[in-house]
Amino acid sequence: MPYTAKKDLLKDKIILVTGAGDGIGKAASKSYAAHGATVILCGKKQASLDSVYDEIEAAGGPRPAVLAIDFETAVPQDYENLAELIDAEFGRLDGLLVNAGWLGHSAAISQYDIENWFKVMQINLNAPFLITRALLPLLNKSQASSIVFTLDEKDSAYWGAYGVSKSGLTSFMKILADELESDNNPIRVNAIKPDKVRTKLYLRAYPGEDPNSLIRADDIMEQYLYLMGADSSDCHGSIISLSSISS
């Protein structure tokens, strides 16, 4: 359904976004800030996060925070340390957008590089588990919090570790939503499955596509706002597919 977010939809909310330095994560961070949220920009490249920070400040949004972390090499204690930093600074977390991902390479399973396989799994599946697990106590401190996952569906030949990791992330999201489904639980869990969006990851996967034929990340932000804000308070365990919206 068409949706237009109120300007103050996320006023005074504290929201962490993974993969905030580029693509959908960058667009979501700027959109959340434009609607009143203090955004914690989380990702690998400090320079990219700093650039998004500057854009949010220049636009007059609440001053964001920057927490650089390498999802490939981070160990469980790194995520616990991240949670402690957020707790000390903000005391709670109202939203989490699990968005970061890595494509790896396209190859048949019989020829897939083992080291590459582990790297993709670490970034796309293990890291979302570790950061979500570490931040659940902070999300429970909010009166009403929301976890949103960016999902993908690639289960045909040659998608390799990317396809398997994304299928695993979908299962993780559904299991988490089922576990947190309770009348007195403040945490909602939902997901968005974008279609053809003009991001570096998509263009790397489809190098022959004309970028001008793709929708921009900014064009799908109303759905990310909807699931993060109070207007979707009755929505839990849902996956919004944007294929029909973008066509």
Image (cartoon, rainbow, N blue to C red):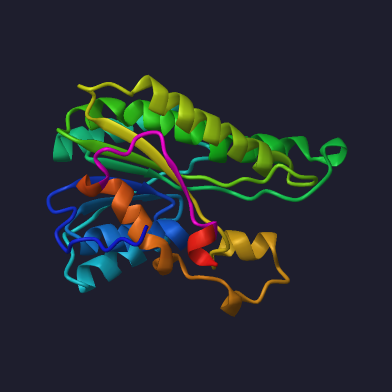
Asked which quadrant contains residue 247, the reply is bottom right
Q: Is residue 116 above or below residue 1?
A: above
Task: Say which residue appears at 30% left-offset and 27% top-offset.
Answer: 136
Position of 233 compared to 122: left or right?
A: left
Q: Nearer the viewer, residue 69 or 104?
A: 104
In this view, 211 is above or below 51? below
Camera sees residue 235: yes
Q: Give the quadrant of residue 234.
A: top left
Residue furthest to the right: 110
In this view, the residue farthest toward the front is 1
Asked whether, in this view, residue 223 is left or right of residue 209, the answer is left
Question: Does the magenta-highlighted stretch encompass residue 236?
Answer: yes
Residue at 63% of width from left, 66% of height from top?
203
State yes or no: residue 92 in magenta. Answer: no
Magenta range is 232-243
Can residue 49 be seen?
Answer: no
Residue in the image at 80% along x and 45% along y: 157
Position of residue 183 measured from the top left corner of the image (x, y, whole percent)? 23, 22
The answer to whether 44 is drawn above or below residue 165 in the figure is: below
- Residue 226: x, y in percent? 30, 52
63 w.r.t. 157: above or below: below
Q: Quadrant of the N terminus?
A: bottom left
In percent of width and height, residue 141 lies at: 17, 29
Q: Residue at x 58, y 79 (%)?
A: 212
Q: Nearer the viewer, residue 86 or 157?
A: 157
- Residue 27, percent from left and from top: 38, 63
